[in-house]
Image: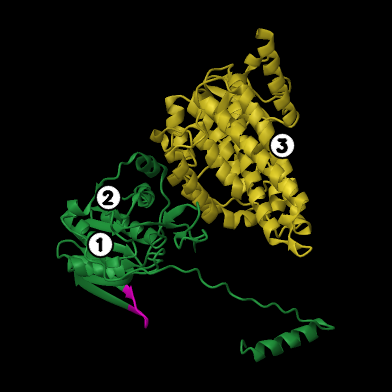
Chain colours: A green, B yellow
Amino acid sequence: MQIVTFTRSTPDTAAKVEVNSSGVVTWGDAATVVNPWDEYSLEEAIVQAKNTGGKATVIAIGPEMHNEALKHSIAMGLDEAVRVQADDLDMTDSLGWATLAAAAVQKMGNAELVIFGKESIDVATDQQVYQTARKLGWTMLSYVSKILAIDTANKTIKVEKVLEQGKQIITVKLPVVISVMKGINEPRYPSFIGIRKASKAVIPVWTPGDLGVSLPGKTSELVAYHNLPARAVQTEIITGESVQEKAAKLVDKLLEEKVL
Amino acid sequence: MDFELSNELKMFQKTIRDFCENEIQPHATAADETGVLPWDAIRKMPHLGLLGLQVSEVYGGADMDTLAASIAVEEIGRVCGSTGLSISAHNGLGCGPIVRWGSDEQKTTWLPKLTSGKFLGSLALTEPQAGSDLLNGAQTYAYQDGDEWVINGTKAWITNVSFAPVINVLVRTRKDGSSHDFSIILVEPDRAGVSVHPPEKKMGLKASPTHMISFENVRVPSQHLLGEEGSGFYMTMQTLDSGRISIGALSVGIAQGAFEAMVRYAQERKAFNEPIANKQLIQEKIANAAVELEAARMLVYKAAWVKDQGRDYTKIAAIAKLKASEVAEKVCHDAIQIHGSYGYSRDYPVERMYRDQRLMTIGEGTSEIQRIVIARQVLREFHHS
């Protein structure tokens, strides 16, 4: 079965992300990493492609910095990688992003399963996942914790989904868009053979023209970014004759502050 | 001149770093305390090519150049000296001689096992009474009896013996008193007459066990001879030249681990109402460590590069190993100094790093031997010019 998954390069989770004096979000010269949630969707795409005797393709939408995530994906074992570049796309415009994503999946022709990570850590949202499913007109299953079976003959998929109240086992007809949870698998490290392949890979770039779509008019406007206000911290050192006395005073304080 | 690592190498380095931080670093303290290598991590290493860094892909290796192999050992050393030493010895001393001088049959028999993640390779040179002076001091002797070699003697301070499917053993096969007296014979540790003694009680690198091993009328088939009879000393010197680059890389790795710990601690620890990193005497240590570490790393990379160019690398390998091992000593020393009493306690990793690095100026040729090698080469160059 042809499986498509999406990824993007995001700032390293250890990097200090802030808004600079010109109002631009920056993380200095810290490295980018594969969106951490995508490690699970990439692994699942590799596993399911292998299980169904198919092919797994990874797509990134956005500027050249996302090639890093695509190369990491190839090094992990994805069969093919494509980048979609639209110069006028605002990466925070999820509807524009989903328009391109859905068109890219359709261009693949025979894709029947799209796998997303739970969310994108850079924009801290998952709405593009649902929008892509809607644009494709496919069933959407979010928060999948396990793929139990894919029946390629009868064109169905059976999954375990996480709900607030517990878990749900559900079988639906393909094609389907799913988003997967951390813990669905143990993402593999890139192999040395994969790294060799990735370092030589030339990643094709598709434009909206190639996909036969134009970006929809923006429905939202980004006004400004602000840094979080610095937290005011007051420090008080508790004094006393003995440890017991200090501890008693500490407990009183904690009760007073309603911490206990 | 280009100091930039290739994209492939940068990606390899990042992957190894992620692997080491996730799979080895969390177990490094326990490995030191229990004396057991992190085998869960080692079993995953074939996927990353770490157990056959310079072994052909045909035999399950990654077929990388010396620079890539050095970077891999450096990254492992950064988080765990014990694992770094065992992996360095496995690749350079265990696999290296079989890759370079093994027959097709020897390669087919041993290399797939060595790259499988179930074993680690080993080389037995040193003897209780002979380390630096193998030529005059090594006594282990092998003679031919029909189509077998019969080996008698004792080897000491051997890394990975207890994990090796086969050991490369340096033996005397003649008694002419020349460098052509020696050969290397492949011996499985489960052959009758082989005794592996209890692990040595060491100062550091405690999870990488070191054993004495005795041979008492040990018989192996004659096709276990590695390369040509009489070329064992030459093969040993070649293997040590190469191994020195790896020990240099391991030294840089351990120093890098200590350096990062030292800088972080200096920024966190407060004294006199400010982080001690603001103090010039602390800054001096940080600056010196940065300078020395950079110099050591460049020498190791250069030695690897010279070897990869196919040029004579004896001198530069000795220079790199000497410098890097002495830098590791200084950087780990200062890392403890900056940590104060905490640095002297086992609660912080710099104490382990200091003990681990101590072998670097001893193993695979002491600093004194490196200086002899370097001076001999320099004097020869001047003599010729």
Label 1 residue SS: strand
The amino acid on which the numbered mark 1 sits, given as a three-letter code, is Val
Asked where in the image residue A200 lies, by quadrant, the reply is: top left
Residue A35, magenta (yes or no) = no
On screen, residue B221 versus residue A113, left or right, reads right
Q: Amino acid at mark 3?
A: Glu
Disc 2 target residue: A82
Residue extending furthest toward the top = B384
- CB-based contact (under 8 Å), mark 1 and mark 3: no
Percent coordinates x, y for residue B54 in the rendering:
48, 33
Q: Position of residue A216 (x, y in %)?
A: 21, 65
**Which numbered marker is on residue A114?**
1
Where is residue B76? Give x, y as percent: 57, 46
The C terminus of chain B, quarter of image: top right
Q: Is residue B289 above or below residue B265?
A: above
Q: Dot 2 surroundings within 10 Å: few (below 14), some, or many (20 or more)?
A: some
Near mark 3 (Cα within 10 A), the count class, few <14, some 14-19 or many ≥20, is many
Residue B120 in sight in this render: no
Chain of residue at mark 2:
A
Q: How many marks?
A: 3
**Marked residue nearer the N-terminal end (1 or 2):** 2
Residue labelled with disc 3: B326
At label 2, the amino acid type is: Val
Q: Secondary structure at mark 2?
A: strand
Residue A163 belongs to the span the image colors magenta: yes
Q: Taking B301 as reference, is A130 left or right?
A: left
Instruction: State the extent of the magenta-drawn residues as a range.
Output: A161-167
